[in-house]
Image: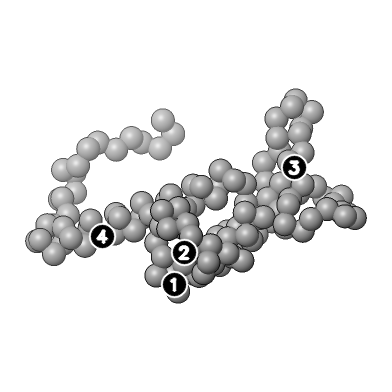
Amino acid sequence: MPLFSSSSSSSSSSSSTTPPPPKASPDGAFEAPNRTARSACWTARDAFFACLDAHGIVDSIGHKEDAERCCGAEEKGLRRDCASSWVTYFKQRRVMEFKRKQTLEKLAAEGARPMPEGMGPPRLESGR
C-alpha cells in the first residue's frame, strides 16, 4: 500500500510502481499517512535493509550502483511504499547508526567508560 494512497484507489491503467499523489486536505495541506501506510513503509524498509545486510552494503547512497544491482527490487518497494523524504531519511540514518556503533565500539576498545549518572548535560523535563 503506498504511503499516500487514496481509499478509493481503483487504478485502471496506472503503473503499479507509481503511487498516486497525496490527497490534499480542505486547507490545502497534504494528509499524513495512516497507520496502515506507515506499517507498509516500515515493512519495505526492513526488507531493503535485510537485503543490504545480506550483501554487506551499509551506505546505499554512497554505493548506489551496488545497492541497485543487489537490492533493486527491495529499493523499488521502499520507494513505492514510502514518501521520498522518508526514503532519504532511512538511508542516511542507517549510515549514521553504523558510524555511531563503530565509534562506541572503538571507544570501548580503548577503555572508555560511560559517564556516571548526573555528570552529563542537564536533561529537560518532559512537557517543556
Between the residue at mark 2 and the residue at mark 4, the CA separation in whole angstroms equals 22 Å
Q: Are marks 2 and 1 in contact (CB under 8 Å)?
A: yes
Please indicate whether residue 30 sits to the left or right of residue 99 in the image: right
Between the residue at mark 3 and the residue at mark 2, the CA separation in whole angstroms equals 29 Å
Q: Is residue 101 above or below residue 7?
A: below
Q: Amino acid at mark 4?
A: Gln
Which of the image's four quarters has the C terminus? top left
Q: Which of the two discs, 4 and 1, sits closer to the camera? A: 1
Residue 117 at what x, y percent from top left?
19, 49
Decide if residue 59 is in sight here: yes
Residue 12, labelled with which disc? none
Provide the residue designation for mark 3: 21
Q: Earlier in the sequence, mark 2 or mark 1?
A: 1
Provide the residue designation for mark 4: 102
Which residue is located at x 53 percent, y 62 percent?
68
- Could you tell me which secondary element the residue under label 3 belongs to? loop
Which residue is located at x 36 percent, y 36 percent?
125
Q: Earlier in the sequence, mark 2 or mark 4?
A: 2
Q: Amino acid at mark 2?
A: Asp
Q: Is residue 128 above or below residue 81?
A: above
> What residue occupies the far top of the structure in this picture?
27
Provide the residue designation for mark 1: 55
Q: Earlier in the sequence, mark 3 or mark 4?
A: 3
Residue 58 at what x, y percent from top left?
39, 61
Provide the residue designation for mark 2: 66
Q: Which of the two discs, 3 and 2, sits closer to the camera? A: 2
